[in-house]
Image: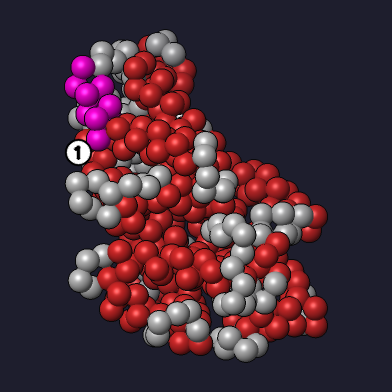
């Protein structure tokens, strides 16, 4: 967002002047992430996760391109090509483990980023488009991650593809033809592996394009902040550079320590041991489970065990699984409260805590075996999940009495001292 007090890019070097007149790329960078982009002064560390998500995307693209150079999308050699990359290619083990754990790191960052949006009302006007594009990014991430999980062609890869693509058969009339079109046959085989590899390679660049739109949409209204109060004066903002560049740099350091600890010391901790067994269509694993970042939605899928009003349980599970994410598209209109931040919404704040606990329960049940009591717990947790968004949130937003908001962002940081509030930023 351009404020009247924002610094204007004025090149001084002759070459930069020449460049600015013909291709104003330095001006674009300066206005997007430099001193020309003013940001609310009270952003906390939860706002670092957007930048970390971009870093994770870059890591995945770079390591994925290197992995693709050595991968063979053929069911006869796919498993061996991964093992060959790890054992025989120089630094191949690093690329493989950085890519595999990078997916987990990406989802950890994105889940925190999303729930920060839930708490601080980042989906509210005028930032609806920022939120909607973010949900699109999450859906593309899930599709990309699923296809990537199939590529090693281990036992869990094969049977995961078998189960997930089998969900399409639940759709009336077009389900089975759609499943066969997706797989290129009647079961996961060479055609399916080639299609998944092609899409897994392509979709990260699609995600990158949507991320650019996401950032573009963010720069129009400007960043939100923990109070939910809009910028009123120059004292409410600071330049993105150097203040938040330094803050993001500190967050990158912490992230790098945790990420490298996983890659170097526990690279297989989040993987499934069955995926180190070559795919065998004649041997079904005892417990088929997707990667951990799919567990909440997998728990919702498995929560439906009986037909409802003549609608098959399988179809209801599929609709609920996709609906659990699609409901996020309607958040800007489901939450009618004029207050953005849950810090000033005492009732909603407690329901948000319950939602977080409910999500943790779904995570646990999604990774557990499909038996009691986990199925019953999944059903209760899934029921609350949808009730939170479709019933509780609209009612609470209509009847809740919020706390008084600060007059300005500066007041929330420095207090009500008039000199502090009215003084321009240095």
- In-front residue for pair 98/129: 98
Residue drawn at x 22%, y 24% is: 395
324 over 395 or under it: above or below? below
**Which quadrant of the view contains residue 234?**
top left
Determine if the magenta segment contains residue 382.
Answer: no
Residue 231 in percent (x, y) is at 32, 32
Determine if the magenta segment contains residue 397.
Answer: yes
Q: Which residue appears farthest toward the top when viewing the image?
A: 417
Residue drawn at x 65%, y 48% is: 255
Please state the total of marks drawn on the protein image: 1
Q: SS at mark 1?
A: helix
Residue drawn at x 50%, y 84% is: 189
Residue 244 in percent (x, y) is at 53, 43
The chosen color scheme is secondary structure
Most common secondary structure along the magenta stretch: helix
**Which quadrant of the view contains residue 378?**
top left
Residue beneath label 1, please? 333
- In-front residue for pair 121/26: 121
In this rendering, position of residue 65 left or right of residue 4: right
**Which quadrant of the view contains residue 92?**
bottom right
Residue drawn at x 56%, y 48% is: 369
Residue 412 in percent (x, y) is at 42, 19
- In-front residue for pair 163/121: 163
Residue 421 can be seen in this image: no
In this rendering, position of residue 369 left or right of residue 42: right
158 over 42 or under it: above or below? below
237 over 91 or under it: above or below? above
Residue 40 in percent (x, y) is at 41, 35
**Magenta segment, which residues?**
390-399
């Amino acid at each position: 967002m351009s404020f009247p007090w924002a610094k204007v890019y004025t090149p001084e070097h002759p070459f930069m002047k020449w460049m600015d007149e013909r291709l104003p790329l330095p001006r674009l960078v300066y206005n997007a992430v430099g001193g020309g982009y003013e940001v609310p002064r009270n952003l906390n560390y939860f706002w670092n996760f957007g930048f970390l998500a971009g870093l994770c995307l870059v890591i995945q693209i770079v390591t994925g391109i290197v992995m693709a150079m050595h991968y063979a999308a053929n069911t006869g050699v796919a498993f061996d090509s991964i093992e060959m990359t790890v054992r025989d290619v120089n630094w191949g083990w690093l690329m493989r483990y950085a890519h595999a754990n990078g997916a987990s790191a990406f989802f950890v960052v994105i889940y925190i980023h999303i729930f920060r949006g839930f708490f601080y009302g980042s989906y509210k006007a005028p930032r609806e488009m920022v939120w909607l594009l973010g949900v699109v990014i999450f859906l593309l991430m899930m599709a990309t991650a699923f296809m990537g999980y199939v590529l090693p062609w281990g036992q869990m890869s094969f049977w995961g593809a078998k189960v997930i693509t089998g969900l399409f058969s639940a759709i009336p009339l077009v389900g089975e033809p759609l499943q066969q079109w997706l797989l290129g046959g009647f079961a996961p085989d060479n055609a399916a592996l080639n299609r998944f590899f092609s899409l897994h390679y392509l979709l990260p660049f699609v995600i990158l394009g949507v991320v650019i739109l996401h950032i573009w949409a963010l720069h129009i209204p400007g960043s939100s902040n923990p109070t939910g109060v809009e910028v009123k004066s120059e004292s409410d903002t600071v330049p993105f550079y150097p203040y938040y560049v330094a803050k993001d740099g500190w967050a990158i350091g912490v992230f790098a320590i945790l990420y490298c600890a996983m890659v170097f010391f526990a690279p297989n901790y989040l993987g499934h041991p069955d995926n180190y067994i070559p795919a065998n269509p004649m041997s079904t694993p005892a417990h088929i489970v997707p990667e951990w970042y799919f567990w909440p939605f997998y728990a919702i899928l498995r929560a439906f065990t009986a037909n409802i009003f003549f609608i098959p349980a399988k179809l209801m599970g599929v609709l609920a699984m996709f609906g659990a994410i699609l409901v996020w598209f309607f958040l800007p209109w489901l939450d009618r409260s004029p207050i953005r931040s849950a810090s000033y919404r005492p009732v909603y704040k407690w329901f948000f805590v319950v939602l977080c606990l409910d999500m943790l329960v779904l995570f646990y049940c999604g990774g557990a075996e499909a038996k009691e009591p986990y199925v019953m717990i999944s059903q209760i947790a899934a029921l609350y999940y949808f009730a939170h968004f479709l019933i509780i949130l609209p009612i609470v937003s209509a009847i809740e009495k919020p706390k008084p908001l600060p007059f300005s962002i500066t007041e929330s940081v420095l207090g009500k001292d008039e000199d502090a509030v009215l003084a321009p930023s240095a």
